[in-house]
Amino acid sequence: MSSQTKEDSVFKALANHKRRAMLDALKEEPRTTGMLCEAFPEMDRCTVMQHLKVLEEADLIVVRREGRERWNHLNSMPIKAIHDRWISEYAAHAMSILDRLKADLEH
């Protein structure tokens, strides 16, 4: 999979507020699929599983099976890659503009 396709799948996964909420829940600790179903009672199990599939395809979660349980673990590396590629570059540019503005105002 190309890096562009990987980024697209991460952005697609993050575009949905329910999936972002699931990632927030997994940030606290790994959870079983059943635990996530309990945490999101407004969704049925099938819908939760569909969201988890999108997150897994984007490599935002890592699934480990223990017996009959499916444990979902957050993998924040794709988000870090998005940050490094998009956010940090733009933030650095914005900071340089603010530094120049501050210098101009001080003179």
Image (cartoon, helix red, strand yellow):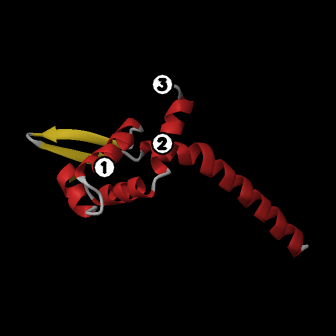
Determine contact: label 1, label 2, CB under 8 Å: no
The residue indicated by pointer 2 is 10
Relative to 100, say whether 13 is above or below: above
Q: Which residue is mark 1?
A: 47
Looking at the image, which residue is at 72% across and 60% down? 95
Residue at image mark 3 = 1
Front residue (pair 87, 22)? 22
Determine the residue located farthest toward the top in the rendered image.
1
Q: Amino acid at mark 1?
A: Thr
Q: Is residue 98 left or right of residue 42?
A: right
Corner quadrant of residue 41: bottom left
In the rendered image, residue 87, in percent from the top left (x then y), is placed at: 61, 51
For residue 22, above or below residue 51 = below
Rendered location of residue 98, percent (x, y): 77, 64
Task: Residue type at mark 2: give it.
Answer: Val
CA gap, disc 3 to disc 1?
Answer: 26 Å
Disc 1 or 2, which lies upstream in sequence?
A: 2
